[in-house]
Amino acid sequence: MTLPIRYEFIKACKQSGARLGILHTPHGSFETPMFMPVGTLATVKTMSPEDLKEMGAGVILSNTYHLWLRPGEDIVKGAGGLHGFMNWDQGILTDSGGFQVFSLSDMRRIEEEGVHFRNHLNGDRLFLSPEKAMEIQNALGSDIMMAFDECPPYPATFEYMKKSVERTSRWAERCLKAHKRKDVQGLFGIVQGGEYQELRELSAKDLVSLDFPGYAVGGLSVGEPKDVMNRVLEFTTPLLPADKPRYLMGVGSADSLIDGSIRGIDMFDCVLPTRIARNGTLMTSNGRLNIKNAKFERDYGPLDEHCDCYTCRNYSRAYIRHLIKANETFGIRLTTYHNLYFLLNLMKQVRQAIREDRLLDFREEFFEQYGFNRPNAKNF
Amino acid sequence: MTLPIRYEFIKACKQSGARLGILHTPHGSFETPMFMPVGTLATVKTMSPEDLKEMGAGVILSNTYHLWLRPGEDIVKGAGGLHGFMNWDQGILTDSGGFQVFSLSDMRRIEEEGVHFRNHLNGDRLFLSPEKAMEIQNALGSDIMMAFDECPPYPATFEYMKKSVERTSRWAERCLKAHKRKDVQGLFGIVQGGEYQELRELSAKDLVSLDFPGYAVGGLSVGEPKDVMNRVLEFTTPLLPADKPRYLMGVGSADSLIDGSIRGIDMFDCVLPTRIARNGTLMTSNGRLNIKNAKFERDYGPLDEHCDCYTCRNYSRAYIRHLIKANETFGIRLTTYHNLYFLLNLMKQVRQAIREDRLLDFREEFFEQYGFNRPNAKNF
């Protein structure tokens, strides 16, 4: 049986060690390192599939928990799966629902069998387990599925984390057994362990022995300082097989995309660019700006003078400010487009820098212009 | 001086008398009869200019009152007018603000000089007059401006209406005098008079003597029965010059677009298709449907099996229902696109029927399929 997900290694950056590659999926291939826009409810908020293709997104993420509740995975399956349902013919990754169960739901109770909790929309009692998470994702038909893991709180004690890691390994094995469509959907394991090197090693050893077609690093970007995240990546990614893709979950700030790539990560996702866009906050090559600021009232320049996206080629700060202030949806379309383009274009620059063996230099240049190097720079 | 707005008559339908023509503006030409999508705040809600062009919109309407309050006409002027501000290079018509002053604002006081009222957003005292309405529209730079008229209540007594018509005539003359950019913006007069034939005649006579480049029929679609609207059009449009365009304000239901065309109307506008789209109500060739209805939950067919719009070619009722139920903006994009396309396509069919001298036959066929002929048909 051919694996549905195949990682093609192209080269490593001689300066940084970052990897350039191509991930092949049943719905097309994309270059890595790559940022994946999030389409929680089978739509990347305000964007059309054509918008996403135009900006260079070859893979998107959708949320199992949310689609399970609305509209229900059987309705998605009836449309031929997520690809048919949402009219997206390229790669789709679905998470396992685990993160939402641990972050959104009330009154959860974790047992060996799975997690009891209440629907965050209507309070109904629900139960999610490794088997159920596989069943839903099999119905959704994503190209990449994620194992159902326990998402521990941050910070957690070594003892708590060790038990959690061991359970996540047992659940991973159950996921593999329950996964019914191994020919067309690839299942990734998730390495947990918090900031404890010993536990990351334990988790990676367990999961690698199960031979997943790809691995995620979970439990980061949960409140820890950036240098902790970087240190954890430094001792975790070398534990993962070089011929499989590595996915850092829930990370989407510009600095972390670069720093993660330098530490051997191939895939990232985050709601950050789309969420802040809806509030009028833009990522630009000179750092963030909030378009609602009064100083942009008569500013007829583009959001970012170095950007060539649809928004920046056609619309002014004054117009976008007007739309956002007036709660006009088209304003959110324009800011969402720009922020996603900004991160996708950043990853394109990262890949080019890897090709040219100069990712550390690129990092310095980008951080300088973006303002990360300024004293009191905001932590973004 | 060349007039900025020129109506080119092509032919009359031998069966119905409806007119086929082309309206030439400083920003391109469009065939008539035509429906104009409404972009209240310099955006047709959720749509991009590219979406509008793709669906065949060659002219849109924007609202002077709303743009005056937000972002202010000087900010629009600084961007090179509305066309530059909103990135729309085709025709734009602006209303005068009169209708909003009479329908939205509180505590209005009508004087000969103009209307005192309060801003509906913050309660500030404001004053709008013929001169001010021209000044704002000159700053906005629309291709077609509308005279500032008094919008009388419905129903109104003959005496009230007569005074109102006479004032509207005096205001129209002041508008013509105050209009500073006659070389690049065409000003239309608005015929009022309610359902009183004598007053429509008086109003038309006054306005035609002022020689506007186009005329609107105002004060209809304000609550009167459809047959009253049709009767008023029957005795009003013959009073207007055959070589000038005729615009029926605020009308956008499918039946009225056909019935208005039959009575010699060339242009229509209404928020109806976009407003109901946001609530999940769709115009289809079999009548209206509300996509929130439970029966569409697993309906994988298009909104309208006879429609070839972007939405109907690519998305199912089940998907759109899911998006609308979950308050996802992309759902509103899809329903808005469809409803606007439906009316623009209807007008295309109306023009084709005029070409073929069979608009009355087309009316019968359309009404039959749409369900207007059914007993207890909804009045839409």
Image (cartoon, coloured by chain):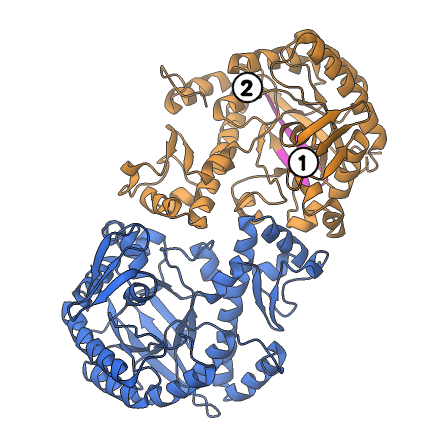
Chain colours: A orange, B blue
Question: In the image, A349: left or right of A179?
Answer: left
Please, what is the dominant secondary structure of the magenta stretch?
Answer: strand
Relative to residue A156, is residue A335 drawn left or right? left
Task: Specify which label sits upstream in the sequence, 2 or 1.
Answer: 1
- The answer to whether residue B238 shows anywhere in this view is yes
Q: Residue at x 36, y 55 (%)?
A: B41
Q: Which residues are magenta?
A: A18-30
Q: Which chain does tag 1 point to? A: A
Q: Picture quarter containing residue A31?
A: top right
Image position, residue A345 (x, y; %): 49, 33
Position of A244 relative to B353 (above/below): above
Vertical position of residue A363 compared to residue A330: above or below:
above
* Residue A283 percent across, percent down from the top left: 43, 32
Residue B205's disc number: none
Q: Which residue position holds label 2? A: A223
Residue indicated by mark 1: A93
Q: Quadrant of residue B8?
A: bottom left
